[in-house]
Image: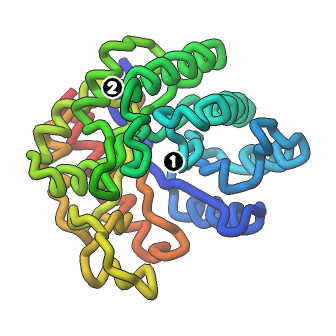
Amino acid sequence: MTACITSVGFNAASTDGEFASYELEMRNLAEIGAEVVEMCVTSLDLIANGRIMPERMARLEKVARNYKFKYTVHGLVSSDFMDPDTLDRQLKVAKAVVEICDRIDARVLVQHSGRVRADTPLNRAGADQREADAFYELAEFAKPYGVRIAVENCFLTSQGEYRRLPSEIAGMLREINHPNLVGTLDFGHAYIDCTHRGLDFMTELRAMAPVTGHLHVHDSYGNMRGATPFYYPQDGVALGLGDLHLPLGWGDINWEEIFSELTFLPDTALMMEVSNRRFGAEQPASLARARQLQALVNNRV
């Protein structure tokens, strides 16, 4: 029987679109014993107008072969299947990323859930169905590749914006009911969204957990960034404001309570979005704690 949480690790991204900075992160993650790496492949200029660049793809394949990691992939951070103006382009890129997944033996592709911006209120009409149809199309495309599309919950960033809650993403996934479509439960995003909307954090987590096949774990204080200007990214940490992506224990999320109760789909990866560039010294401790959280789940199921 496949365990619930089968691997623990971190994400990796290029700082400049080139491979040297990317490979540095990979080496560091190998040294601390991460089992799985989420490749932010769209940070590498691998795709141009929806087309995979062969030379760069060959370089990525070579990098991936140099390590024994299990791989997952994060799609475009700006992905938005609710946007009618870019939907065709978004799907073209997402399908290219599915092909990249197959080339590096990554069987999970994380895609952000969409939004309707406050300055495009007319796009709200049909937005939910537009997004659902796009995810179904992408899941159908991914099926012969053996790739699962994992829809990630996000959070409101401005007044008048529309986004689905984790519970609403869960409802969409159940309605579509596709074997290659699961949820990515981002705890930090859910915490911020619930605090901002005055909703119960655990209630939203409970709603999404049963359809979740991928986890994004990072700490914060559940506060919106707001309009406060930051000179350094560290200003946000000092103030406790924003989507901080902190090492486990730096924020105030009660991880042990969450992982003592919730259960996820089999073969779920616990992926920490905690930057090696800022928090490399803290990553080993976060990895050790994440493995304790993994055990809290796997020992129950």
Mark 1 vs mark 2, CA separation in Å? 19 Å
Q: Residue at x 43, y 63 (%)?
A: 274
Q: Residues within 10 Å of mark 2 (few under 14, many from 20)?
A: some
* Total tally of numbered discs in the picture: 2
Name the quarter where the C terminus is drawn.
top left
Q: Which residue is mark 2?
A: 265
> Amino acid under label 1?
Glu
> Amino acid under label 2?
Leu
x and y percentages locating residue 151 in the rendered image: 42, 33
**Lower position in the chain sequence, tag 1 or tag 2:** 1
| Residue 12 visible, this orientation | yes
Q: Secondary structure at mark 1?
A: loop
| Left or right of 213 on screen, residue 276 | right
Q: Secondary structure at mark 2?
A: loop
Q: Residue at x 56, y 40 (%)?
A: 72
Q: Which residue is mark 1?
A: 35
x and y percentages locating residue 152 in the rendered image: 40, 39
Q: Residue at x 60, y 51 (%)?
A: 40
Q: Which one is in front, 92 or 142?
A: 92
| Residue 105 visible, this orientation | no
x and y percentages locating residue 258 in the rendered image: 17, 46
Q: Which one is in front in this view, the residue at disc 1 or the one at disc 2?
A: 2
Query: In the image, is residue 1 above or below residue 207?
Result: above
Q: Which one is in front, 8 or 200?
A: 200
List the single residue furthest toward the front.
122
| Left or right of 224 on screen, residue 151 | right
Q: Residue at x 45, y 27 (%)?
A: 131
x and y percentages locating residue 96 in the rendered image: 71, 32
Name the quarter where the N terminus is drawn.
top left
Q: Which one is in front, 163 or 278?
A: 163
